[in-house]
Image: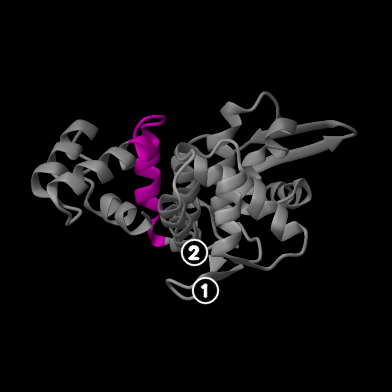
Amino acid sequence: MLADSLRFLEAWEPDLSPDENLARFAAQRLLGKTRVREKAVLNILRRRFLETNASVVRTLRRLRHDPVALREACYYEATRTEELLAAFAEEPLFTWYHAGKREITLEDVLHWLATDRRVPDWNEVTRKRVAQGILATFRDFGLLQGEVGSRRKQITFPNLSLRGFLYVSLRERRRCSSDRALLESRVWRRYLLTPYDVRRLFLEANRLGYLHFSEAGSMIRVDWLIESLEEVSNVIPT
């Protein structure tokens, strides 16, 4: 739903309340869908962008000038609210990539859906539709690449922009019990990053003056020099 997310952010009126904006979207069908589909999509976007932090929409709107960081931030919000997307990224996709697998197929995703205990006992038709949706979603978010509709996709080399990294870190830090927990959080697996990769990003943010990162033995400390999520849009990309 990346395209719907972009339309939603572009048409959002910052001078109106969330409820007023949602009513306006539904009444005018600003996403260009049937009334029933518009309502369903708006309900998903409401959960992604409006339920946890009032500054999420404001920040995402400010990130529109940086398509990469915006995509990375929208991916975070999508996987935060859609358990199946998070589970696929954190487990099979992460494991396959770091085991040296560079191409996945529709059959790989179908096998995971059929064997993971958390996945509902869907029939074959539903599993195939969901598997195709997973491949398309991760292609849209840049973790996979390949032709639209292809049964084969290549896993993209892990890469998280500085703005994207700071957005995820600021969103996650209040959910983590410590700075070490943030560095080792499973959320980074959704971007195919290891703790070593995350440490490198913290050091880069430290070098550029957005935070202070220190490590002594098992102790890790992060002192933030930016506090507001909206400040992420002011970060100079590298």
Q: Which residue is under mark 1?
A: 146
> Between 37 and 170, which is closer to the camera in this rendering?
37
Q: Is the magenta stretch mostly helix, strand or loop?
A: helix
The type of residue carrying mark 2 is: Arg
Provide residue 106's location: percent of width, then percent of height: 54, 63
Quadrant location of residue 118? top right
Inter-mark Cα distance, 2 to 1: 7 Å
Q: Which residue is drawn at 51% across and 46% down?
A: 85
Drawn side of residue 229 relative to residue 41, left or right? right
Disc 2 and disc 1 in contact, CB within 8 angstroms: yes
Q: What element carries label 2?
A: helix
In this view, the residue in front, 191 or 231, is 191
The quarter of the rendered structure image containing the N terminus is bottom left
| Amino acid type, label 1 | Gly
**In the rendered image, is residue 233 in sight?**
no
Q: Residue 9 carries which label?
A: none
Numbered label attached to residue 139 = 2
Region in magenta: 47-65
* CA neighbours of label 1 inside 10 A, class few (<14), some (14 to 19), many (20+): some
* Closer to us: 40 or 205: 40
Closer to us: 72 or 55? 72
Q: Does the magenta stretch include residue 59?
A: yes
Q: In which quarter of the image is residue 66?
A: bottom left
Identify the residue shown where x is 45% and y is 60%: 132
Q: Position of residue 186 (x, y in %)?
A: 66, 39
Residue 200 image offset from top left, x and y in percent: 75, 52
Residue 100: image location, x then y, percent: 76, 64
